[in-house]
Amino acid sequence: MSAPDPAPAPPLARRLACFVYEGVLLFGVLMVAGFIYATATQQRHALQGTHGLQAFLFVVLGLYFVTFWSRTGQTLAMQTWQIRLLTRDGQRVSALRAGCRYLAAWMWFAPALLALWLAGIHTPWASFTTLLAGVLGYAALARLHPDRQYWHDALCGTRLVLSPKNRPRP
């Protein structure tokens, strides 16, 4: 008797749609977190305390992702797009593994942000286009992975799969 086939990876277009929807949802999360930070620190000017705010928002994002990934394997956007995060062997992801995935997932943005910083570019349009190119380039690298997973998933021993009710029948 052979083991059941592992759940298939979601198509790249579905994962990117989930990524965009996640950004829409996170806009609200970060706005509320920014308001809480500004109120708690009595921030009176947008340029005051920017590094503290960035660090706070980094932690808030980490808590959001680690909590959802380790409890249900799905963020709110992943639930909508019927995508689930599991370990390579199909188990629930631990909080430690979810935290590692959160840190490794910054590979989506790090190369583009580093390029912008090194080039001294600060204009909104150039920043947007550089980040967009970086994100699309990183997403395209999933095509090079044998299981069509993102490279931060390969690094962390996780995989994105279609939720059971959305899997094609054999």
Image (tube, rainbow, N blue to C red):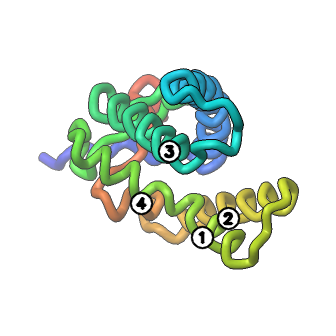
The amino acid beneath tag 2 is Gly
Q: Describe the element under mark 1 as helix, strand or loop.
A: helix
Query: Marks 1 and 4, how far apart in space?
Result: 14 Å
In front: label 1 or label 3? 3
The amino acid beneath tag 4 is His
Q: Describe the element under mark 3 as helix, strand or loop.
A: helix
Disc nearer the start of the sequence (2/3)? 3
Disc nearer the start of the sequence (1/4)? 1
Label 2: how many residues lie within 10 Å, few (<14), some (14-19) or many (20+)? many
**Are the residues at dot 3 and dot 4 in contact (C-beta closer than 8 Å)?**
no
**Are the residues at dot 2 and dot 1 in contact (C-beta closer than 8 Å)?**
yes
Left or right placement of residue 73 versus residue 146 in this view = left
The amino acid beneath tag 3 is Gly
Query: Marks 2 and 3, how far apart in space?
Result: 26 Å
Residue 133 occupies which quadrant of the picture? Answer: bottom right
Q: Which mark is residue 83?
A: none
Q: Describe the element under mark 4 as helix, strand or loop.
A: helix
Comparing 126 with 8, the one in front is: 126
Residue 82 place in picture, x, y as percent: 50, 28
According to the image, label 4 marks what residue?
152
User: Where does the C terminus fall, quadrant-wise?
Assistant: top left
Number of numbered discs overlaid on the protein picture: 4
The amino acid beneath tag 1 is Pro
The residue depicted at 52 percent of the width and 71 percent of the height is: 144
Residue 109 place in picture, x, y as percent: 59, 59
According to the image, label 2 marks what residue?
134
Looking at the image, is 146 positioned above or below residue 38? below
Looking at the image, is 129 positioned above or below residue 33? below
Comparing 11 with 86, the one in front is: 86
- Can you see residue 170? no
According to the image, label 3 marks what residue?
52
